[in-house]
Amino acid sequence: MLLLRRYGIHLLNPCMNLKNLGITKDSIEDLQNVDYEKLTEQSNLALQQAANEFSIPGPFGGYSMEWEPVVDGDYMPTHAVTEDSFAEAGKDIPLLIGTNLAEWEAFSAMSNTNGSQNGNKTTWSEKEVNARLDAKYGDKAKEIANAFKEAYPNKTKADALFVDTMIRMPSLKIMSHKADQNGAPVYAYMFTYESPVSPGLFLATHTAEIPFVFHNIDKSATVGDSKEAKTLEDRMSITMVCSSIKIASKHRVFICACL
């Protein structure tokens, strides 16, 4: 059963999917022994059925939804973050949270690698960059471009076209509420590294920081092996992984939100 109060859905009827798994209400404990792939398949099917039935819009068009925690008053007594506060239960627990500069904003270019390699922010003329800024930001284009350059002096004006707000804004709310508690510290980061592989194509998109955190950029075909990348890898893995372990061992609980 899954409570989805956010959408006004009180209960998804699991009977159809349980039947597909050969499970009845009298043998519900057998779920513990279901093969992971089969369970995932039926789980995804249930989600899609519910999304279609209740017309829940997906982030990239169509209908879709995902499993999410719900407040049950016991295991999860309150929401972790509300419009004006952070959960009291987390006041004394450190929070590590961060986002990437581009996140989802550059995925459309990455999905068209052939075209993007010949035409991207590194090849556009200043006139074309300005036209794109005007198209995206309207009469705020110049103001936004100037503010971006002030915040990120090592970036180009064209990079202002790929600044994420979908994930960054909620993250700012989370870290602000947590800091306002005056409890355990908040460690916040912004990942901005841009890969030299295919210049202008592989920006600081969603999950781009993962190889650096776990010190395995050599496993990623889109990072490259530059001295800068290796230095960043060393610093990030030591700072984030080792610090997380240290904090977790001290507090027993550690909140890590790599969004």
Image (cartoon, helix red, strand yellow):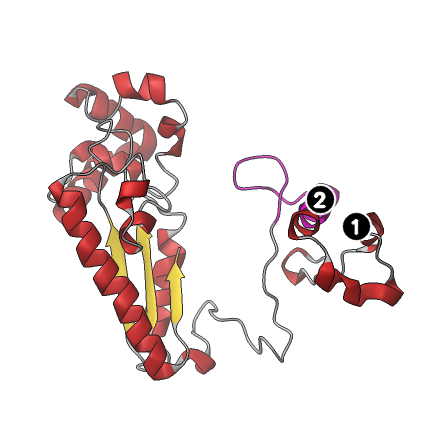
Is 105 in the magenta?
Answer: no
Where is residue 133 shown, x and y percent of the image?
26, 30
Which amino acid does the dot numbered 1 rest on? Answer: Asn
Q: Position of residue 179 (x, y in %)?
A: 31, 74
Please name the residue that numbered disc 2 is placed on.
Answer: 45
At horizontal 72% and vertical 47% (from top left) the residue drawn is: 42
Label 2 is placed on what type of residue?
Answer: Leu
> Does 97 sit above or below residue 149?
below
Question: Pointer 1: what residue?
Answer: 17
Residue lying at 78% horizontally and 63% vertically, measured from the top left? 30
Instruction: Answer with left or right where residue 81 lies relative to residue 173.
Output: right
- The reply, left or right, for residue 143 in relation to residue 252 is left
Q: CA distance from mark 1 to mark 2?
A: 8 Å
Query: Would you identify the image quadrant in which residue 182 lies?
Result: bottom left
Find residue 233 and name its label. none
| Residue 9 picture quarter | bottom right
- The residue lying toward the viewer, choosing from 199 and 32, is 32
Q: Secondary structure at mark 1?
A: helix
The residue that appears at 32% across and 39% down in the rendered structure is: 220
- The image position of residue 11, as x and y in percent, is 76, 60
Give the extent of the magenta segment.
Answer: 41-65
Q: Quadrant of the N terminus?
A: bottom right
The residue depicted at 36 percent of the width and 37 percent of the height is 105
For the residue pair 229 and 50, the one nearer the viewer reads as 229
